[in-house]
Amino acid sequence: MQICDVLTTYKRSDLNRLAKDKIANYVGLPVDILRDELRKVLTTYDHIKRKIQFRKPPGYTILDIIVNLQDFSVPIQEIKGIVQEEIKNVIEEARSGKGLIEDKQYDLYAKMLRTAWDFQEDLLPPEANLLNALREYLNITRGEHRLLEARLEVFEFSQASFSREIEHFAREGIIFTHETDYVIPEETVERIKEVWGIELDREPYKRLLGYLTSSQLYSALGRLELKRSGNHESRINRVLEKGVKPSDLLNSLTVDDLIRVADKSKCPRRYKKDELVPTIISHIKRGKDIEEKKSDKEPAPTREPRLVTDEAFKEALSRFATPQLSNVLSKKNLRKSGTKNQMIERIVNSIYSLTTILDSLKMDELINLSKVYELPPRGRKAEIVERIAHYFRNYQVKGTKATPKELFSIYEDLSKQNKNAYRDIGIDDAQISLPTITADFEKATRYIFESIFGLTVKTQIPGREEPDGIIKEDNIILYECKTVLSPPYELPIAHRDQFRRYIKDQYDKLEPHAKTALKCFILVAHSFSDNVEDKLSQIKFEPYIPFCLLTAGDLKFIAESWLNEQKGRTLPTSVLIFQGRYTRDKLRAKFV
């Protein structure tokens, strides 16, 4: 039952009682408006947190019973008996000591808890915050807190304490009476769970734990400082009984373990732990892991999640023999013609991930590749594929030893992957690979924005799916560098999806007050195909920001002009904000 349905059954006098001290000038409000205002106030997180946190017993027990009942309701005549029985059971468990067997500072927390309750009926907000902070620091779970509380005299059931808590929750709009029942509205239940840190109900949480292997659960329990003994089922029950938050459990796992859990639960993959953990929890909470997809139509192919950067992907493929690349392209119904480098570009720009490409190889080919990568060639095919993929997830492509200034001198050649240009700066091009050229192109681009234009630049963290650089001044501008073996650059589908994700991810990371500072996305390439702006117009960026196309030649020309004419000055970031093709003439017009 939702709160609006409950409030509809309340008389005007009952509504006035609820509105007192919560809504200004409530007496003169029409009844429909008063109900709506109460609905808004009574379901806020802050209101519910203030009114339920660290209430004296049996406050928590009353709420816990109703929250865990179907329809979140209980007969008024039965609630007292249920609460008495529950308190009796908790006290017996606390006395047995079975739930307090971990190596934790229980005595310290119990002493602070006793001291907190000795002086007054309820805790003040600062006291509650201190107790919460201590509980987190000592890693005391919600279940352990309750058992320690059950050892105090205040936990004993009495008619006076029961009536006090029921009246408090009714007065504050947490518990309502509906016909012959006590009811907590659905919206309020969700907020109570948030306050208590309950991210998943018991059954969904049990499903989530079922996706962990015995070894993963064993490791997680160890990191959470809980007993690790017993079989898989007993470990699952221990996590549930101790009240361990799903996010704490998942954060104790490695990224590789989380990816396996995501795959088992049919959850979309993410590329960082802080994104993967909430995604898995939300996926399980919504029941998506047990949802059967019904569709008569064959779904359109989507780009597989990339857990490696394009540069690392190219580096991995550069070790393939040309016949292997041709065979992979054939299996994936991609064009086989062209040089080895063109084949690599075609695979990287396709919808397929490195894992899928590796899986299309034969076992003996994977073993030989493992040796080339200097990785152990043992294990089953899936294990070898995962080992190679994992290696390149953390792989950092290194550029040459050339200085940024030297690379700036061959900037246009780098943008079209002309490795012969390295001879002009005294570097042997024999061992130069495509990923190396790309790394050098990114290095030279950073030199332009940082050293010539005088801007603050944050570059991509190795192994992460991020833009090559983020300019952080009064405006925030993202930029990406793309080298092309056979110009012009054509904005393939894989890159469109990539850029859309970059913009959305960076926007989501910004604090609310800083979101409006994200002003532009700059793409730097050798040259662009005639229809690139048509393709660009079809991309739905969320949020919308201008998308600037800048050729390497034009960027270099402007950089040289700035260096000669404006040396020592910082380029205003407003100059870089532009939608579409940004030519040197348009650029110069802004600062000349």
Image: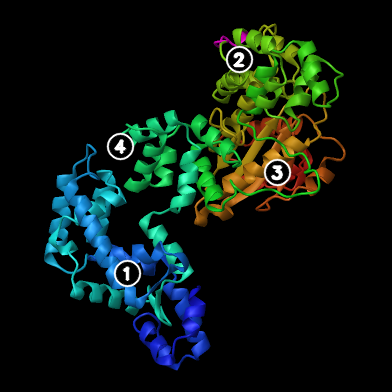
Farthest-out residue, bottom = 28
Cα gap from disc 1 to disc 4, whole angstroms: 32 Å
Please rate how many residues cluster around mark 2, counting C-alpha atoms within 10 Å: few if below 14, some from 14 to 19, many from 20. some
Callout in the foreground (3, 2): 2
Q: Earlier in the sequence, mark 3 or mark 1?
A: 1
Q: Work out how far the residue at label 3 is from the one at label 1, CA to CA, in angstroms.
A: 63 Å
Q: Would you name the residue on which mark 4 appears?
A: 226
Q: Amino acid at mark 3?
A: Val
CA distance for labels 4 and 2 = 49 Å
Pointer 1 or 4: first along the chain: 1
Residue 384 found in image quarter? top right
Of 556 and 391, nearer the camera is 391
Quarter of the image that includes the C terminus: top right
Q: Is residue 22 visible?
A: yes
Q: Which mark is residue 592?
A: 3
Does the residue at mark 3 contact the one at mark 1 (Cβ under 8 Å)? no
Q: Answer few, some or many: residues within 10 Å of disc 4's Cα (few below 14, many 20 plus, some between 14 and 19).
A: some
As helix, strand or loop, the secondary structure at mark 4 comes to loop
Label 1 element class? helix
Q: Nearer the viewer, residue 428 or 535?
A: 535
Q: Is residue 589 magenta?
A: no
Q: Residue at x 75, y 11 (%)?
A: 420
Closer to the chain start, of discs 3 and 2, is 2
